[in-house]
Image (cartoon, rainbow, N blue to C red):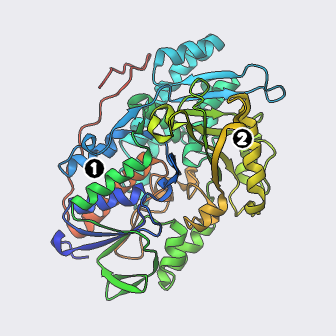
């Protein structure tokens, strides 16, 4: 690498325009590097694609925006303000957690509003168990310590050497990172439903709460600390804001431009797309990790070993996502984010992550963005998506073309305990399946979140932000450190940029001061912020 190259003389290719790819491209452009982003689909965003059915807008993927300061930082470092590009609306409660009586759906469900108001959380838990209320305060303190160790200190730092892991091992060991999220929650909480309420978050990044490291309990404190938000106009509006910033900085986005192959020629990365080849000083891949090595670099001998290694790793579950529009708002029945738990928890998760068939029951995440932003549906209507975690194709290679219609109908029928006569009011619907993830998003096994976030597949043990064998190849997205989720992939892009800056002699802005907390959390000494 030429550590003295002028940024303006460097040309970087970014493959994929998901949040990780766009964040990396913006950082490169801010540093003065010429950037070209290749996107296979007709719209940017990757998993944050947008479907439009008439006046109904459906965000295809990420809908929970946390740690907004890491997004703000991209704009600040470029001399802009995020608020001038998109408005982030606070969501309250963060989630409504619902446990129906599945034997008799006519009976009242158990409901828990999960939000950033510590007093409300304590009151709801205390109504179930005074001991659990005290345990919850101790859990929040534990989550704060994990947050400080695992997010504040490590999320945007690359783990390229084993020694990087050794240095933090005592701290993480003291926090018992070897324990699972659920085991850790159960240490503080006895009520079964509260245990589920405090452990389901790892599913949002593709992890089984019974297998994912307790490091991921930091999500609880992260949300409490900074809140949950939704972009006005939908998640696609946030993608559009990032694309606008990128183009203002001189970056180029090419849509409908799939990359066929990348070869190494005289130290350059030759990217071939639509029959045209262009040489670049570096490539940042936001494509699926396995696809990057097995397909994009398929002619590169050094990539084959990594492809084989990835095939031996555990991959996250997949998803069935049903998008539907209604001629009723159901605003009195639902909140923005709802989680509807099935009759089983541990057993269902075992079947989702390790089973070879589709379970008869399910747990669901229901997204109703029009509750926060009515513009996403026509007047008097509602815009929804409902998500069911399902096995990936490597475990259960099911015929989703045949299964899909009946499964969609079953899910809609199950929601009628919450939204009366729902099926009579659905006016448009569509769905995506594990097969969609495998084809449209070239995801290995149709996994929705890439490599599973187990302890043995985290930090140094996760695919690195910088390829160790192929100079000039860098990685962003859910498959590399620190992992999935919007804050994860945006912080991961920062870690990747640190690697690029060191290799090419680029200057990165100093890390800003930590963002102030947005909520008061009783029992841990937090102070209110803006």
Query: Residue drawn at (39%, 33%), measured in percent from left and top?
Result: 89
Question: Mark 1 packing: few (<14 Cα in 10 Å), some, or many (20+)?
Answer: many
Camera-side residue of 147 and 53: 53
Query: Residue drawn at (36%, 50%), measured in percent from left and top?
Result: 156
Residue position marked by numbered label 2 in the rendering:
412
Residue position marked by numbered label 1 in the rendering:
74
Q: Position of residue 470 (x, y in %)?
A: 40, 76
Q: Is residue 476 left or right of residue 437?
A: left
Decide: is 272 above or below 450: below
Camera-side residue of 120 and 400: 400
Which element type, helix, strand or loop, lies under badge 1? helix
Which element type, helix, strand or loop, lies under badge 2? helix
Q: Is residue 197 left or right of residue 495?
A: right
Residue 290, located in which quarter of the rendered image? bottom right
Q: Quadrant of the C terminus?
A: top left
Camera-side residue of 516 and 417: 417
Indicate which disc residue 88 carries: none
Question: Mark 2 packing: few (<14 Cα in 10 Å), some, or many (20+)?
Answer: some
Q: Position of residue 212 (x, y in %)?
A: 59, 45
Decide: is 250 above or below 493: below
Q: Is residue 103 left or right of residue 513?
A: right
Query: Residue drawn at (56%, 49%), measured in percent from left and top?
Result: 455
Camera-side residue of 465 and 434: 434
The single residue placed furthest to the bottom in the displayed view is 266
Q: Quadrant of the N terminus?
A: bottom left
The single residue placed furthest to the right in the displayed view is 103
Query: Residue drawn at (49%, 86%), measured in percent from left and top?
Result: 299
Gap between marks 1 and 2, in whole Å?
39 Å
Residue 159 in sight in this render = no
């Amino acid at each position: 690498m030429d550590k003295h190259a002028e940024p303006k003389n460097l040309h970087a290719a970014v493959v994929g325009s998901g949040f990780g790819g766009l964040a990396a491209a913006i950082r490169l452009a801010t540093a003065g590097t010429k950037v070209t982003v290749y996107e296979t689909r007709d719209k940017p965003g990757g998993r944050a694609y947008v479907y439009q059915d008439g006046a109904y807008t459906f965000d295809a993927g990420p809908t929970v925006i946390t740690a907004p300061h890491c997004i703000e930082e991209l704009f600040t470092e470029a001399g802009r303000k995020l608020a001038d590009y998109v408005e982030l609306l606070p969501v309250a409660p963060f989630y409504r957690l619902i446990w129906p009586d599945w034997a008799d759906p006519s009976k009242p469900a158990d409901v828990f509003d999960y939000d950033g108001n510590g007093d409300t959380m304590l009151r709801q838990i205390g109504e179930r168990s005074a001991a659990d209320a005290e345990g919850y305060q101790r859990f929040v303190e534990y989550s704060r310590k994990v947050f400080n160790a695992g997010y504040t200190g490590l999320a945007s730092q690359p783990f390229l050497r084993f020694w990087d892991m050794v240095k933090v091992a005592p701290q993480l060991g003291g926090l018992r990172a070897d324990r699972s999220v659920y085991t850790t929650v159960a240490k503080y909480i006895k009520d079964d439903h509260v245990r589920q309420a405090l452990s389901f978050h790892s599913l949002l990044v593709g992890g089984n709460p019974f297998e994912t490291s307790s490091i991921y309990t930091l999500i609880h404190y992260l949300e409490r600390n900074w809140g949950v938000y939704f972009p006005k106009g939908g998640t696609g509006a946030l993608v559009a804001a990032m694309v606008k910033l990128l183009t203002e900085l001189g970056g180029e986005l090419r849509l409908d431009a799939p990359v066929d192959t990348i070869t190494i020629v005289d130290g350059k990365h030759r990217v071939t797309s639509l029959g045209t080849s262009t040489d670049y000083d570096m490539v940042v891949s936001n494509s699926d990790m396995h696809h990057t090595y097995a397909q994009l670099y398929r002619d590169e001998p050094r990539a084959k070993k990594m492809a084989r290694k990835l095939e031996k790793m555990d991959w996250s579950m997949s998803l069935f996502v049903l998008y539907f529009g209604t001629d009723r708002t159901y605003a009195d029945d639902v909140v923005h984010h709802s989680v509807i738990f099935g009759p089983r928890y541990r057993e269902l998760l075992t079947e989702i992550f390790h089973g070879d068939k589709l379970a008869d029951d399910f747990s669901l995440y229901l997204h109703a963005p029009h509750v926060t932003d009515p513009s996403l549906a026509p007047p008097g209507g509602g815009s929804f998506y409902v998500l069911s975690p399902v096995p990936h194709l490597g475990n259960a290679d099911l015929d989703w073309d045949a299964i899909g219609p009946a499964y969609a109908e079953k899910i809609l029928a199950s929601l009628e305990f919450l939204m009366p006569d729902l099926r009579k009011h659905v006016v448009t619907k569509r769905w995506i399946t594990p097969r969609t993830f495998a084809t449209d998003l070239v995801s290995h096994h149709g996994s929705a979140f890439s490599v599973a976030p187990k302890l043995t597949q985290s930090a140094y043990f996760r695919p690195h932000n910088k390829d160790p064998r192929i100079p000039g190849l860098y990685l962003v997205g859910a498959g590399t450190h620190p992992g999935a989720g919007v804050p994860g992939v945006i912080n991961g892009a920062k870690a990747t940029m640190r690697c690029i800056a060191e290799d090419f002699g680029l200057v990165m802005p100093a890390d800003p001061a930590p963002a102030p907390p947005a909520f008061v959390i009783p029992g841990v000494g937090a102070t209110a912020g803006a």
